[in-house]
């Protein structure tokens, strides 16, 4: 009985983490943490949209050096915003200006923030946090 309950909580943690990665805050929404879900979606979405509005660059999967690969994984953490970035930003990046460079950093910060929220959703889903 305990082993089956442990598997169920482990699976809920994984489902919450995957859902939270795809759509920021969705993992917390599935765990009935309504306010956290709204705050995380607004924060990650706000950072990602601000970065794209500033015409920041989004790293692709065909990175050649280590820093570009790290940038790709940071950007990929933004979930759905990463996959929609090229449709949202039709003019392309403009990193020749300071605003474009800041936009690149804001988008990467959105991805890293979402990775932290995914880890929290996993922890809550497997029963690690009672708040």
Image (tube, rainbow, N blue to C red):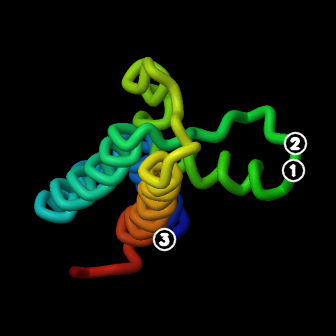
In the image, residue 45 sits, relative to residue 39, either above or below, namely: above
Give the mark, 3 or 2, whose residue is nearer the N terminus: 3
Q: Are marks 2 and 1 in contact (CB under 8 Å)?
A: yes
Does dot 1 land on a helix, a strand or a loop?
A: loop
Q: Residue at x 39, y 47 (%)?
A: 51
Looking at the rendered image, the quarter that the C terminus falls into is bottom left
Q: Are marks 3 and 2 in contact (CB under 8 Å)?
A: no
Q: Residue at x 57, y 43 (%)?
A: 96
Q: Residue at x 42, y 51 (%)?
A: 99
Number of the label disc, if any, that sits on residue 2: 3
Depth check, front residue: 25 or 17: 25
Q: Position of residue 73 (x, y in %)?
A: 65, 50
Number of the label disc, if any, that sits on residue 112: none
Determine the residue located farthest toward the front in the rendered image: 97
Does the image show residue 75?
A: yes
Q: Is residue 60 left or right of residue 110?
A: right
Determine the residue located farthest toward the right in the rendered image: 64
Number of the label disc, if any, that sits on residue 64: 2
Does dot 2 land on a helix, a strand or a loop?
A: loop
Q: Mark 1 = which residue? A: 65
């Amino acid at each position: 009985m305990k082993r089956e309950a442990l598997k169920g909580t482990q699976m809920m943690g994984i489902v919450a983490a995957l859902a939270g990665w795809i759509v920021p805050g969705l993992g917390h929404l599935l765990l009935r943490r309504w306010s956290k879900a709204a705050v995380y979606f607004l924060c990650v979405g706000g950072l990602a949209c601000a970065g794209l509005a500033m015409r920041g660059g989004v790293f692709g999967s065909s990175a050649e050096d280590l820093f570009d690969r790290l940038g790709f994984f940071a950007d990929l953490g933004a979930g759905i915003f990463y996959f929609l970035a090229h449709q949202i930003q039709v003019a392309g990046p403009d990193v020749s200006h300071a605003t474009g460079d800041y936009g690149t950093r804001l988008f990467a910060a959105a991805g890293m923030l979402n990775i932290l929220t995914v880890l929290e959703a996993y922890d809550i889903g497997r029963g690690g946090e009672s708040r």
